[in-house]
Structures are given as structure tokens and as C-alpha cells.
Image (cartoon, rainbow, N blue to C red):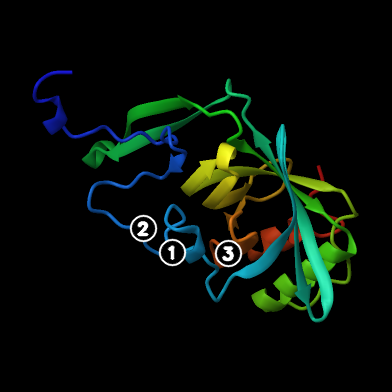
Amino acid sequence: MGLFDWMKPRRRTLGPTPEGLYGELPRGAHWVGGADPAGPPQHFTPTSEALVFDIAEWKWDAQLWIAATATLAGDTAGFGLVLGLSDGSHTDAVEVWEHKGRAGPALKERQEWTIPRGHPTREMALVSHGEQTTRVLRRLEQCFGYEPHPHSALPDKTAVICELVILRGVINPGEGRFTARMKGVFPDKDGWPYGEFFLNVNSVRKQIWVSEKSGDYRSVILNRISHPGGAT
């Protein structure tokens, strides 16, 4: 390290820091849009428009298994989540683009990093809990202003494969801390249209909550968890 190296701007990487921090912000910047997921866990709470669930079961092993439940209209509603975890050899990467005037967007750099052991990869499965997930479906239809569908959610234990993108948070397997705001993505695949939603996890408060990314994805979300739907 040179004498004046400390004066040079530190290059921000888009992967997690050694402390498990995701979404490192530039100096002087602040997280907007609610409480900072990387801040005190007791302050990272759902906003009024979110659909909130308690973490009923939590198993952080070779995969992260989560059962989320809530009481809706007096009945238990819920679903399951399975997150793929790195064994320390998985990698991830992002491309950073910049606009070059009339030339259009140009690739500035590609950052790649090793996903730490026990941290999520981009693989996620939404798992139906049968009738409990049908109650979630009915509530989403109500929230979205849709008439109830005549069919139920996907059969019990049926999974829909999604992609998971961590936006900001702190993940520390050794301490059992997983407080993060993430984006779930339904890929444009096998004739199914593309869709996104926000997924928030606070293992300290034992809560999960979901909210919509855009009203344009409402029908996609409902169709993917409905029966007949996008089972994988």
C-alpha cells in the first residue's frame, strides 16, 4: 500500500462485503424507500402496503427452508420458500453499463465474485402449501382489485422456480442474521411472461413481507401461483 493510497476513492464492488453487507452505498448516500435493511433489525419493518407473514419454520442448512404463515380472515394462510445456498464455490456477476450518447449504452465493466458459504445464490423456489396458499391467492386478488378466480393455488408442495436478486441487507450465517430487501423474478420462459415482486426477510423479527414492484406484473403473479399455473 502506497503512502497516499488511502486518499484514492475506494472501488465499490457489487457483491457482498466480508461482513455480509449487500448493496454497499456510496459515501454520504442513504437508503430510501423505508427502513434500511442493513441497519438495526428492529427498525426494518413492513410498510403499510405490504402483505406480512410470520416465519413459522426456518432451517438454514444446505438450503434455506422457510415456512411463512399469516392469519387472513380468521384462517391460516401461507407458503414456503426454498433458497439455494452457496457452498463457497458458487460465483455471481453483474454487468455495469453506461450511456455513450448517440452510440447508446456501452459495457463499462463486468464484476464477478465468489458467493460466500451459506449465502443465497440466485435460485429460489416458491412452494405451495395447498389451501393455505389459496388463501394468499384470494388476498392478492383482493389487493389487486381482481375478481376471485374460480380455481385454487397450485397443489400442495408444488414449486415455482424464480430468480432471487439481493438489493440490500446483511446476511451472516454464523449469527443467523438474514435481513434483506430482495427482488423475486419470474423469468420469461416456456411461454410464461416476465414478472417481478419485492421480497423482504427479517430473521431477527421472524417476519417476511412481499409487495409489488409494478402493477404491470399483477396478472403474471396471480397466474404463476394459480392452478392451472406455472408449476415446475
Residue 125: x and y, percent? Answer: 73, 44
Residue on which the image places disc 2? 31
Residue 106: x and y, percent? Answer: 31, 33
- Tell me the CA gap for discs 3 and 2: 19 Å
- Asked if the residue at tag 2 contacts the one at tag 1, i.e. Cβ–Cβ closer than 8 Å, the answer is yes
Q: Residues within 10 Å of mark 1 (few under 14, many from 20)?
A: some
Residue at 31% from the left image edge and 35% from the top image edge: 12
Of residues 140 and 9, the one drawn nearer to the viewer in this rendering: 9
Q: Amino acid at mark 2?
A: Trp
Quarter of the image for residue 117 reads top right
Q: Report whether 21 appears left or right of 64.
A: left
Against 67, residue 45 (above or below) is below
- Tell me the CA gap for discs 1 and 3: 17 Å
Q: Amino acid at mark 3?
A: Glu
Residue on which the image places disc 3? 212
Q: Name the element at disc 2.
A: loop
Task: Tell me the tag on residue 4.
Answer: none
Residue 230: x and y, percent? Answer: 79, 50
Residue on which the image places disc 1? 35
Residue at 41% from the left image edge and 45% from the top image edge: 23
- Asked if the residue at tag 3 contacts the one at tag 1, i.e. Cβ–Cβ closer than 8 Å, the answer is no
Q: Residue furthest bottom?
A: 73
Q: Name the element at disc 1.
A: loop
Q: Residue furthest front?
A: 175
Q: Earlier in the sequence, mark 3 or mark 2?
A: 2
Residue 227: x and y, percent? Answer: 86, 58
Q: Name the element at disc 3.
A: strand
Q: Residues within 10 Å of mark 2 (few under 14, many from 20)?
A: some
Q: Residue furthest left?
A: 4
Q: Report whether 104 appears left or right of 59.
A: left
Against 198, residue 113 (above or below) is above
